[in-house]
Image (spheres, helix red, strand yellow):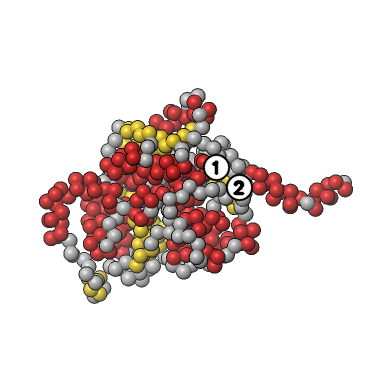
């Protein structure tokens, strides 16, 4: 009995010690987003063994709240690792990713453009892969496999090179040329697949059945099939809050392929509420944008479904949106609904016109996916889902420089000149003449 009492007295301490062995610093455990099952965070994990649910990293937020405040962020290095208080305590593989500019739109008074094209490798994928590769190195993994629509491949290749690990990339044969070239330069092993990212994912799934997979330290860093890419992407949510003075905008418009950034930002808002960094209950409307040629999320939302169905014959010039079914679709839909947001599909023509408009009005040369965000904003203004008074953040998820072949093919050489004649249409908004 006495021993039990002593056990109780030191129980809390023991618990923390025991958790610390299974976690990493303030990262206490992983939790299944479907069934809530806990998993230790001190070893590589994939998805929930029971139901395939995505595992989220959970932290001792109460202790972090006591020992760290948002005021302490001031003066920290302008990378996503400034938020290391809420990231796993491992030695980062960093190329300076994150803390990208939050630019006031020159066209729309209450719009901000979060320019993720300025990340290493020219896209927001740098964040997730910086975190994912950091943890892979931490766990001693050697060979990282990824199916990718393009930009995740480039990012994995770069971070694996920086970490001294092998990158094995499976991507569609028709990805933008930049993605193929960069992967070669970063020294990755590239397999070009006839088909879509879903076909690439099947190739990785086949490899996983091979006997060498575990023995040789292979690991699948597919979107949401390991817990840490979400952790990297969530830093976008922390940045939205910090860069807007801890005042959450009314809406976030997010081009959605795999949708990890949308999930990650929502997780960040939850954590920041628990930490007392933002006011509780003031979440932005999360708005998911896809292309008309591949719009499983808007379709599922409209039909009131909890998950999406595989989009047949997916096609769009926005390679990053060509994801026929996201693994985390059920969470994306849940977040969109909980936030009173929406999901919207835009045409390739609207995307390409919006790319030109953003470039020529804002001085930002966006990826087609960034153009999709602007096109969606314009449609949501027209449908009065948003008003011009709403503070809205548009995500440009990548640099247009990685899509030169895509743009050239769309417009044709003469097309660029013709376009310049056509475009200066709608710059007069609400009687205000934009400065151009
Ligand atoms: Zn589960």
For the residue carrying disc 2, how many other residues have a C-alpha within 10 Å: few (<14), some (14-19), or many (20+)? Answer: some
Q: Are marks 2 and 1 in contact (CB under 8 Å)?
A: yes
**Residue 223 picture location, percent across and down:** 44, 43
Quarter of image, res 105: bottom left
Comparing labels 2 and 1, the label whose residue is closer to the camera: 1
User: Does residue 149 appear in the picture of this structure?
Assistant: no
Quarter of image, res 63: bottom right
**Residue 359 picture location, percent across and down:** 25, 59
Dot 2 or dot 1, earlier in sequence: 2
Vertical placement of residue 379 versus 257, above or below: below
Q: Nearer the viewer, residue 322 or 27?
A: 27
Q: Can you name the residue that lies furthest to the right here?
A: 2
Q: Nearer the viewer, residue 17 or 200?
A: 17
Name the residue that disc number 2 marks: 24
**Numbered tag placed on residue 138 in the rendering:** 1
Q: Residue at x 23, y 45 (%)?
A: 405
Q: Is residue 310 left or right of residue 280?
A: left
For the residue carrying disc 1, how many other residues have a C-alpha within 10 Å: few (<14), some (14-19), or many (20+)? Answer: some
Q: The C terminus appears in which quarter of the rendering? A: bottom left
Q: Nearer the viewer, residue 149 or 33?
A: 149
């Amino acid at each position: 009995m006495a021993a039990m009492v002593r056990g109780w007295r030191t129980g809390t301490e023991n618990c923390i010690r025991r958790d610390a062995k299974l976690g990493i610093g303030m990262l206490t455990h992983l939790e299944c987003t479907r069934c809530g099952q806990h998993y230790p965070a001190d070893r590589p994990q994939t998805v929930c063994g029971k139901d395939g649910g995505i595992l989220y990293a959970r932290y001792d937020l109460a202790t972090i709240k006591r020992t760290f405040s948002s005021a302490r962020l001031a003066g920290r290095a302008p990378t996503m690792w400034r938020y290391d208080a809420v990231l796993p305590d491992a030695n980062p593989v960093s190329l300076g990713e994150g803390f990208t500019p939050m630019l006031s739109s020159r066209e729309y008074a209450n719009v901000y453009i979060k320019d993720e094209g300025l990340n290493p490798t020219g896209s927001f994928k740098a964040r997730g892969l910086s975190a994912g590769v950091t943890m892979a190195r931490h766990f001693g993994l050697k060979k990282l496999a990824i199916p990718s629509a393009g930009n995740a491949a480039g990012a994995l290749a770069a971070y694996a090179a920086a970490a001294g690990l092998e990158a094995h990339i499976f991507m569609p044969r028709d990805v933008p040329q930049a993605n193929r070239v960069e992967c070669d330069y970063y020294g990755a092993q590239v397999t070009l697949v006839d088909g879509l990212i879903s076909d690439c994912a099947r190739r990785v799934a086949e490899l996983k059945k091979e006997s060498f997979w575990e023995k040789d330290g292979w690991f699948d860093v597919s979107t949401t099939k390991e817990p840490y890419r979400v952790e990297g992407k969530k830093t976008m949510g922390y940045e939205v809050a910090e860069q807007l003075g801890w005042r959450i905008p009314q809406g976030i418009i997010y081009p959605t392929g795999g949708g990890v950034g949308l999930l990650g930002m929502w997780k960040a808002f939850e954590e920041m509420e628990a930490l007392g960094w933002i006011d509780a209950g003031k979440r932005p409307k999360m708005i998911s944008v896809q292309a008309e040629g591949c719009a499983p999320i808007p379709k599922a939302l409209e039909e009131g479904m909890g998950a999406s169905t595989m989009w047949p014959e997916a096609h769009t010039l926005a390679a990053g949106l060509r994801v026929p079914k996201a693994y985390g679709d059920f969470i994306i839909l849940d977040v969109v609904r909980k936030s009173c947001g929406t999901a919207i599909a835009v045409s390739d023509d609207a995307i390409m016109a919006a790319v030109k408009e953003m470039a020529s009005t804002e001085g930002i040369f966006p990826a087609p996916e960034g153009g999709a965000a602007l096109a969606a904003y314009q449609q949501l203004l027209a449908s009065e889902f948003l008003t011009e008074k709403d503070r809205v953040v548009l995500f440009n998820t990548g640099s247009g420089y990685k899509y030169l072949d895509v743009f050239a093919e769309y417009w044709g050489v003469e097309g660029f000149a013709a376009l310049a004649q056509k475009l200066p249409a709608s710059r007069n908004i609400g009687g205000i003449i934009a400065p151009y």
